Image (cartoon, rainbow, N blue to C red):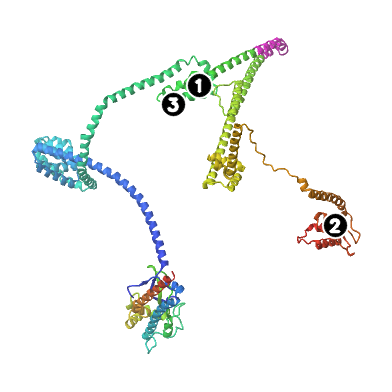
Amino acid sequence: MATGAIIARIITQYSAKGSKQAQKDITNLGKQFDKFAKKSALAFAAAGAAVGAFSIKVGTDAVRAAMDDQKSQALLASTLRNTVGATDAAIASTEEYITLLQKEVNVADDELRPALATLARATGDVASAQSLLGTALNISAGTGKDLASVSLALSKAVNGNLGALTRLGIPLDANTIKSKNFNKALDVLNDTFKNQADVRAKTLEFRLKGLNIAYGEVLETLGYALLPVIEQFANVVSTKVLPKLEEWIKANKDDLAAGLEKILKQIPQLITQVFNLFDYIQRNLGTIKVLSALLVSTFAATKVYAGVIALTGAINILTAAFGKQAVAATAAGTATAFATGGASALAAAAAIATFTTAALVAYKQLNKNNDAIDAQNTKIRALTPGWGNVYGAPGVKNAEKVVVATGKILGNTTKLTAEQKKQLASQEALNKLKAMGVTPTSETDPIQLEAVRLNLLKEQNLAQKAMYDQLLANYEATNRMNIAAQRYADILMVISDSKISQEEVNLLASKWNLTNYEVVKYIASVTGNVNLGAGWDAAGLAAADGWKKALEELNKYLEAVGKENFIAKKNVPAMKNYEAIFAPNIQQLAAATKTILSLQEKVANTNKIPDTPFVSPSVSMPDYQAYRAGERGDINVIVNNAGSAITANDLTETVRNGILAGQTSGRSINARVLDL
Amino acid sequence: MADEVIVLTGIKETVDALKQFDKAAARKFNKVINDELSRAERSADNLVIQFTNPVYGTPMRGWRKTPAANPRTRGGAGWPAWDVSEIQAGIVKSRAQGKVRGDYTTSAGALVNKNAAGAIFEVAGRRGNASRNQFIRYLSNSFGKASRLIWAVVDKDKEAIQRRVAAALEDAKKTLQTNLNSRR
């Protein structure tokens, strides 16, 4: 369409393309709404929570404000009634005045009411008190003193004590004070602090306070609405809940007291027991001190320590107090007994005995070594003069030192070597046990450990064998059960028509890897139906059984009549003179056998022919013909060669053609012919 | 321009379906639309003749009849000449759907004014303060406000055309429904 062409649409149609876009737009819009809704929900949830919390706070503040306000009103009303004999109407009017004054000067009614009450008590008149309250507000605004103090000072001044005003810092000349003329002083004060309250009320600070007061008023209004509900709740608590609670306590006070007494008794006993335990350890610490040095060096020490710590952990109340004693007791076999129980106590005793023995052995070995060293030293000392001759006196001294040092070294080395060997042996045995998954607790004798290992090995093998046998038996039983279940399912399928065919028996026999007879017997044993189990040969078996029973009855009868039992003849046909019948056939067979044997002999000779090259253009093959004729019986092949056979192939071709010409059975001639 | 727009639904679908079942009915419906558009096209062509002063051969005396030999604007062809036959040839009917509007409608039949002189005559003074331009002022005084050719025809005949097309569409739908019912 040309650029700038004017188009005037006449016929307008709805566009599905547009609607699809519209649907897409609407879908997107919906998604946007969903997102917005989710975000909004979260935001509203947060806002709701905040509002909830704020509501609770507002509600609490409102009730509290209302209660305070109510209390303040009640105090003022009471004061006015008592001092000036104010009526309810006057009190209500005063409340209105307080409310208006509060808004005007931005001072809370909770401050105005006590001040007004104070002034009312001093003046005995509500109107005068209200007038003085205005002065007090101005003085408070001008001096910065709180309204209560100023009101109190004014109330004293009303009674002639003008000095109370000066003590607040309110300036009054001495003459006025001396005159004790309150009205004169009041004039001075009104002139001095004129409109101070109004000015203060218009400051930002008091405007904000005004807002706060207004909010407080709202809270009070709300609180007054909530107060009845709170009162009702308090009433319910005081009239229903508390009496029930009191009643319950009365009914159960003895049990409660007894329970508390029991607890109080149990705690000291527990503490005493635990204290006794560690006291015992502490008292016996000296007795077992000798053995503790040995135990500390063993791996068992760690376990002992852990056991004591575990015990102290369980009694965590006393851990801090007895911690040091527990650590000290870790080296003690007695502590082991306490920490690990009876079995471990025995193990600990065994360990102690073992190490005692080891210490004695080591001691004896050490003595032997010392004796040997002493003997060596004696010998060396015997040679000392010789040293002296060679090296002089210093040389002798040095030689003695050398002897002593050598002796020490020798002793230590011997001791160390013995200990190392013992340790290595123990470690080796331990490693073997660890490899078997066994961690010894106290035994360190390598011989004992090896014995234990061998014993465990033996037990372990037996256990493994027993476990293996059990597993195998379990596997076989499971397998048998599976097979039986499968066969049972097969049987149910097969006998669904209340009979078993021969094909079904064959099929089951193939599937179960059984014979047909075994299948039938198996079915009979499972189903309990002998006839069904007999299946396909049921009729024959039934007849056989019937015959046997009949025979038994017959023989019984024969025995009863004194005759011999009937013995059935075997089911074998009677022999006839078959030789006479088949004599001609036998003779023919013998002749044929003879012929075959002779032919076989000839064939054996004929088979040598192909090995000899054919040189003659005319070959007669009577033997071959005879052989073939004998083999086939009814084929005679005559091969005539007119002198055209030059090579072996020519001869083969000739023979083949001859065979083909003589073959009249219609069968195909296979490749054997070409192998001639 | 007409304030109300009749939106026809299923024109394309009906015609496509009718082409399969009843080609004669499809041709009949298409003929209705084409006839209506041709009639509107002829009306617009007549307006071109009507607005051409027989003395000057143009709507106004100063409107040149031959293309400007020396274009006054860079790359432009100058003020387009008024040639009745050219303008008439530029007014054609169209059944192109065009763009889909915001109200999800497309065109099923429209008149197009392709000629530049015809387009100027059509819409000159549609926007802006026409009274300041002497050409537009004269044009408006002599031939009325903008929408002077094809839009004038459309404004005048659109409603009737739409009703006739709508009636034809309903007939086509009925024919299609009859065919569909017979093939159940």
Q: Nearer the viewer, residue A508 or B138?
A: A508
Determine the secondary structure under disc 1: helix
Q: Residue at x 8, y 41 (%)?
A: A87
Answer with the quarter of the image where residue A10 lies. Answer: bottom left
Determine the secondary structure under disc 2: helix
From the viewer's perspective, is the residue at label 3 or at label 1 nearer? 1
The amino acid pointed to by label 3 is Gly
Q: Is residue A448 above or below residue A542?
A: above
Q: Magenta part mainly helix, strand or loop? A: helix
Q: Residue tagged by mark 1?
A: A343
Residue A313, which numbered label? 3
Q: Is residue B166 above or below residue A627?
A: below
The amino acid pointed to by label 1 is Ala
Q: How many marks?
A: 3
Among the two numbered marks 3 and 1 on one chain, the one whose residue lies closer to the N terminus: 3
Quadrant showing the C terminus of chain A: bottom right
Q: Residue tagged by mark 2?
A: A625
Disc 3 to disc 2, how far (Cα)?
A: 116 Å
Left or right of B22, for residue A152: left
From the viewer's perspective, is the residue at label 1 or at label 2 nearer? 2
Q: Nearer the viewer, residue A569 or A370?
A: A569
Left or right of A576, for residue A611: right
Instruction: Give neighbour class at mark 1: few <14, some 14-19, many 20+ (Cα, 10 Å).
Output: few
Magenta range is A371-400
